[in-house]
Every structure is written in structure tokens, then in C-alpha cells.
Image: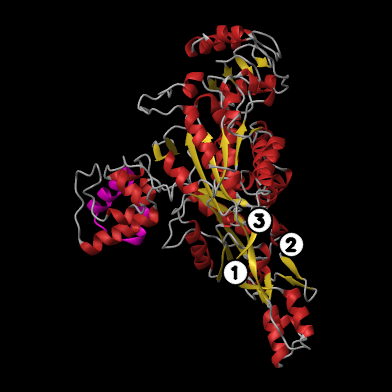
Amino acid sequence: MFLALFHSLRALKVPVSLTEWLTLLEGLSKGLHNDSLDDFYYLARGLLVKDVAYYDAFDQAFAYCFKDAPLPEDLATKEKILEWLSSPLTQLRLSPEELDRMQSLSMDELLKELEKRLREQDEAHHGGKKWIGTGGTSPFGFNGMHPSGISFASERSGGRAAMTAFARKYRNLRNDLTLDVRQISVALKRLRDLQDVGAEETLDLKATIDKTCRNAGEIDLVFGRERENQVRLLLVMDSGGSMEPFRNLSERLFSAANKLNHFKDFRAFYFHNCVYEKLYTDLETDESVPTAEVFREFGKKYRLIVVGDAAMAPYELFYHSGSLEHYHQNATKGIDWLRQTAEAFPRRAWMNPLPENSWNHYETVPAVGGLFPMFPFTPEGLGRAVRHLM
Amino acid sequence: MNNQPFHQFCGTEGYVASRALQDVVNVAIALERPLLLKGEPGTGKTLLAHHIAKALGMEIILWNVKSTTKARDGLYTYDTVQRLNDARFGDGDVRDIRRYIKHGPLGRAFAGPERVVLLIDEVDKADIEFPNDLLFELDEMRFHVLETDEWVNARHRPVVIVTSNSEKELPDAFLRRCVFHYIDFPDEEQMRAIIDVHFPSLSSELMRSACRIFYGLREVSGLRKRPSTSELLDWIRVLLASGAKLPEETVPFKSVPFLGALVKMEEDLDTLTRHADRSADVRTAGHRFFR
């Protein structure tokens, strides 16, 4: 009878394995549930769910199986949408006129339209102009090219989607997340410059034996120094705005670098749209440091990885006071800040989450690419960037 | 099947455990699986292990994991230098390699004559592969000493408690073998019970205003480190020792006595006393993610 729980957990994407299920049965056979539903609840949750992010899903499944509560409706809808989207098509190219025409839809109009189409549409659809699906020019779906559309995907979508619908709920989809953090970790591990540091305190066994033998059995201990990675890494990430669909990628890069315990030092800063006179350390409190101080403190010593789509409105890059925020009353153009950044960091790379073949469609990407060696944010591109940085 | 007596953990007089927590602890003990604890710093993850040991009358063995810790360190180390030295100066029997094998925390937990509690503290600090390297040993409860070609078998399966602060995941294979529990931050009612355990004679007026200030502080946005249970207890201890009175009007927290006991970081003190508009120090900045 409990199998229903197992299946609804799986349906809600909780990664429950057979091993864990058998452990639960073992627990039941030992009477650990004490014949009480509450104890059974804690027993099952402790054994089946290994991440607090899934506690909510577990509660839903549990209520569904034992209290006859329905599975949440919006969730069922989302499941359906995600299913439609699960077979993506290749990217579509649009002419600038078409882009302009589509950009004119406002967020409210888009949401209203989405609701209407959800009611009308009842099957998966890919590559068209209207229905929710992948690879088309409909403002809804993903991998599409509608510039202000609503994206259902949380990564690698092609257009500048105005909102990433449902991303929150599915952010923690486990498999792709760990896989990606792992892939990134593996790539970053190659950023390595081992040097002997510290006091001579590790015993070099081979040299000791060798020397002792030469010494006719008189013990002669040889100590060596530890080898430590000398690479310092500075990560500067564009956030918000057109980068919103790629937030997961930035998060993964950050957590991979942060968790790796591999670098001599690792720092991360953020910017909006373009690097200006301040770099943010915390976007919630808007805490920042002056960019010039970052150059002075970290330049030359650190390797720099910038993450951004470099797809700005041209005025943000090329005109004075081009920044969106009114308090940037400075006389330096965005492109000049980027040039200074490039000069301060001789070893630098720019990771761009936009597909490489679309870069030339944006005026600003080649301009930034002239200052920073630019690589696509793919496993292969990251590998190239790392080789370039060494 | 399990021949151990069924241990029932229901908290101790020094530790208030929620029903959920009691249940998972007992499940982990009965199924002989490692118990993985996560939760905000200061929710008593480490303390729990000590109190389980106390409640069950077992010895506790600590293994504090550091960034340089290798899985093998927990099993045993082979003291080559000592052996070479002994060979040189003719001390003892250097042919007996066993004399130079020193058990680590896990090794001691296995080899001991009694069942013990083994606390593997802050497992996320080590290399990403660290938990995976221990899978075999924790599963089979034995390990192989390469130098002597001997197996060390656990006489009793220790009660293994693993704590982690990381928000990111541990390896799946490791997770599959664990019992998992996330310790929620105590709500006000639970907190009163906890305070009551530590300060039985605290006046109800002080209890009420201390809780009010504490939970008010935790809701201030932008704090680097929100005060936790252990800080609250320290703070109450200071308040009692000094006999200070708590003010009625506390926002913006400037007038709270001994604020430093609750809030440890200078930037946070700045935030609370409204001096936060200076920019951060570039030498220490850039260590956090924004969400």
C-alpha cells in the first residue's frame, strides 16, 4: 500500500532510490513507526528525503497518499508544460525587424496571453509561432527567440526572456544541477599552479631511504615542502536583467569555485549590465566596493573570469552616464570601465552564456569580445577558457 | 536483525529535542545508519551528538573534519618516522609494524570494546570526494590496514552522527545510506523551553522581552550572521550576571545592552546602528553569493 507514496514521490521529482525504500521497509519491519502516523511520517522523511528542498514535495506526496489530498493543481499543470518542452529544437534566427515588433509586448499583455493560450492548447508543440513550445517565435516556451517572451526554462534559453516562469520550483532539479557543478569543478581543477610552499615538514620517504642507504644505514631523514596551488581567482558576474535566465549557471560556477577548496584565494563580485565605478558584494543590501580598489587589490595577482551575456543596449556601453541607474553620475563610459578592467587583469576570460553563433547579432558583444577573450559557457568553452587562463 | 538493546533517545535534561528529532535519532540507532544533520549554525547539531552519548551512556569520539582531512586519517596513520627512529636507536621491536599503526577516530570507534557515538563534525569542509571515500568503511564497518595486511572489524557498530553546514549537496551514494534530518530553527515556544532548561529561574518578564528582541533581531534583513540559540543563551547569561534591564523601545537596537553578545560581526553591528552606508572593505569583500 505504501508503494503509492514511492511513486508519488518519484512523480514529484524527489530522488528516492530503491535502496532507501528497502531501508524504510526494514525500519517498518522493526516497528520503528510505533504504530503511529506521526512517527511513520518522520521515519519515512528521514530515510527517503535527503535534502530540505524536498521536504515540501514530501509533505505533498504524504498528504496525497494518506490524507487523500489532491496533488496540487498548479503542479500538475507545470508537469504538463515541462513535458511539452522536453524535446527542444535548435535555435531560430530572427531579423532585427521581427525582433523589434515582438519586443513591444508588455509583461501584462504577455501574462494575459499566456493564460489564454494555456486554456486553448492541449498538446506539445515545437517550432511554431503561437503555441507554447520550444524553438519557435511564440513568446512562451524556451529556446525560442522572442526577445521579451516568458521562458519556462531556467537555463540556456535563447532570447532575453522577461521572466523565468516556474523557475523557483524547479531550480533544484537535482540531476542536472550536480552534474553541472561537477563538470565545472572538474574544469576548474585544471586552474592549477603547484608550487612548493611552507616549512619543510613532510617526510620524503623515497629520498630518505635513498639517503639512508648511501649513509650505510645511518638514518637520514629528508623533509620536503608541501605543494600548494598558487592560483587566485576573481569571479565577476553580471546579474539580473538579461542574465536572469542564466542565473543557475552563475550560481553553479560560484558554488563549484567556492566549494572546490582548490584556489589560494577566491572572490566574487557582481555588476548590473556593465562594470561601472562600483562592484557589488551583496545584491540584497546593495553593498559595494569601488571598482578602482578592486583593480588595485586584485589586479595582476588574480585570474579574472567575467560571466555575462555582454548583450547590452548600445547606450549602456558607448555613452556617458549610460547606466540605467540614475545615481551613476560618472563621466566614464561603460566601455572605458571594461577597458580598464582588461588592463588591470592580464589573465582574463569572459564566459558568455549566449550561444556562440549568436554573438555577432548583438552590437555590444563583439565590442566586449575585443577586450576580453570570450568563451561560450559550455563544458567545452569552459575548458578552453581554463586553458587560456593558465 | 539487530541484537542491540533498542535505545530510546528522548532528549536529555540539558537538551530539548523535538519529536521529529527524537524519532530520527532512534531510527538511525535502530537501523545502524549514519544520521546526517543539517541546519542553521547554532541549532545544536554538534551538541546533539554529545547529548545522545550522554543519554545512552556511551563514550563519544570526535572527528573534527578540516579542509585538509583525508578519509584515511580517520582510519589509521602509519608512523614511519617513529619506526625509522626506533630502528636507528634500537628501541623496541621494529619488525612489529603494528606498533606504528595508530588508529584515527573511526578506527578507534571500530576497535573499542564498547559501542560508542562517533561524531563526524562539519563533513562538508573536506574535499568533495571525502564522504564517498568512507562509504565502504561505514557500510561494512571494517577497514583494511595495508601495511600489516589485516582487517579491523567493528565489534559494535558505532552510532554515527554526521553534521554539515553546506547548502550544496553531498554525494548521492553517501546520502542514500544516511538518515537525514534538517533541524529547523526553534520557534518561540520551543525557544522558551530551551531557555527554561538552561535558566530555570529566569523571570517570565525577562524571558518575554529577551525573546521579543531576539526574534526581532533575526528579522532584520541584511544581517551577515543572524543570532542563533547559543548566542541567545550567552546573552541571557550576561544579562543575568550584570543585572541589566531590557528597554521597552528597542528599534533600532542601539539601546539593547550587550548587543555584541548576540551580533558578532562588525558590519552587522553597523547595520543595526544605521551606519551601513559606507562601502565594504575591499580586502575582505567578495566571499559571498547573493542568494
Characterize the magenta stretch by its predominant secondary structure: helix
Label 2 with label 1: CB-CB less than 8 Å: no
Q: Say which residue label 3 marks.
A: B131
Magenta stretch: residue A234 in it? no
Say if labels 2 and 1 share a chain. Answer: yes
Relative image position of residue B186 (x, y in whole percent): 41, 48
Q: Which residues are magenta?
A: B192-216
Q: Quadrant of residue A323?
A: top left
In magenta stretch: residue B195 = yes
- Residue A293 in the image, given as x and y percentages of width and height: 42, 44
**Which marked residue is nearer to the observer: mark 1 or mark 3?**
3
The CA distance from mark 3 to mark 2 is 15 Å
- N-terminal of the pair, mark 3 or mark 2, is 3
The answer to whether A178 is drawn above or below residue B92 in the figure is above
Q: Which mark is residue B116?
A: 1
**Which is nearer the N-term, disc 1 or disc 3?**
1
Task: Describe the element under mark 3 as helix, strand or loop.
Answer: helix
Query: Which image quadrant is residue A352 in?
Result: top right
Q: Residues within 10 Å of mark 3 (few under 14, many from 20)?
A: many
